[in-house]
Image (tube, rainbow, N blue to C red):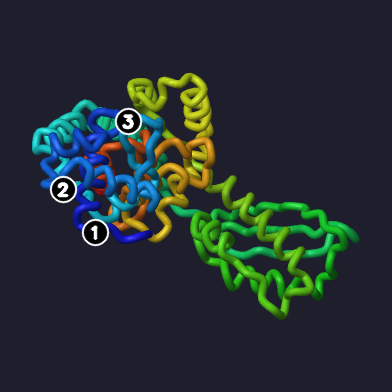
Amino acid sequence: MLPLDVRKVRILQAVVNDYVQTSKPVGSERLIEVYKLGCKSATVRNEMAEMAEMGYLVQPHTSAGRIPTDRGYRYYVDELMNPPAALAPEDTRRAQDAYEKAQSEVADLVLQTCRILSGLTSYASIATDPLTEATTLRRIYLTGASPRHILLVALLSTGHVEHRLIELETAPGDRALAPLANYLNAQIAGHDLEEVGRRLRGLETPNNMAAHASTLAKVVTTLAQVTAALSERRVFLEGANQLLRQPEFQDVQRLEILFHALEQRNALYQVLRRALLGSDIAIIIGHENAYEPMQECSVITTSYRIGNRMAGYLGVVGPTRMNYDRVVAAVNLMASSLSQVLTNLSMA
């Protein structure tokens, strides 16, 4: 990401803040008038033109002002955002009071959390149900089934056994399959299904197994499908109607694409899960999202816990023109609140 000097930083911050509030492209005259930048309008125009060349701003129409790009929002989120100042004490009290109306059923608590979060942010909120007990992959076995098929057997900690028949051009013999199974077990055995899925995505073929790379790839793909299906979780969605109020989604076609994407609960779950690899809170902006139907949106997500155990995911979906400070603060607040409620409930 190209660096910005102090003046450009101030301009970017002003453009983001103004565009989030008004949903209108921001011109140099307005920046001078409202944000007191301490320089002439021509200087601001030149700076904004340079920032457009650098990829931080874009001019949606020839005679319009500028709006932030995904890169501009990313710089704002990484360098300028201040979530702790974004929620007032009354927001926190309102969120906590709303829990008093929730029932003690876990699903009701998660759903109520989504409703509160949607109310705080004015965007759609999503959450997974809590994982009560992690299922572990104990071991896999590979054996020949026919000249063109091998049998994959996965033994789980629950005692459940999954079988999959894998078709190949030519199936290797059991002597060749044994090292493949041993290699995979060394990488994934003993881990819960979500961790297995993560490890499989980064798996590479060792040099000494290059002759059977295609077989290994087929087995890995099948295993990934098995673990994804077994770890599929219920996804709650609240406040989708909030998106109707956003100018970005007044276009019926764009709205239909987004609503269809939000109906794909498994795809939503994958977005939530992948976002949090290695992060306490994840912010996916526009085209950073690998799920193409949601590339007009930003997704902010974090995990919630029961005691010391990660139990599920909670997040917000909105336009890229999002009040990131407030949403990050609200997501953190509600994840912390839900974690506390569920922990207390588990200890009662």
Residue tagged by mark 3?
Answer: 123
Point out the tag, 1 or 3, that comes first from the N-terminus: 1
**Rounded to the nearest whole Å, what is the CA distance between mark 1 and mark 2?**
25 Å
Residue 84, which numbered label?
2
How far across and how far down the image is residue 49, in percent?
Answer: 33, 46
Look at label 3 and name its amino acid: Tyr
Sequence order check, earlier mark of 1 and 2: 1
Quadrant for the N terminus, please: bottom left
Which mark identifies residue 5? 1
In the picture shown, does residue 348 fall above or below 2?
above
Report the mark closest to the observer, 1 or 2: 1
* For residue 233, above or below residue 137: above
Q: Position of residue 58 (x, y in %)?
A: 38, 41
Q: Residues within 10 Å of mark 2 (few under 14, many from 20)?
A: few
Whether residue 329 appears in this view of the structure is no
Label 1 vs label 3, nearer the camera:
1
* Mark 3, secondary structure of its residue: loop
Tag 1: residue type?
Asp
The number of numbered discs placed on residues in the rendered structure image is 3
Quadrant in the picture for residue 40:
top left
Give percent across and percent down for residue 76: 28, 49
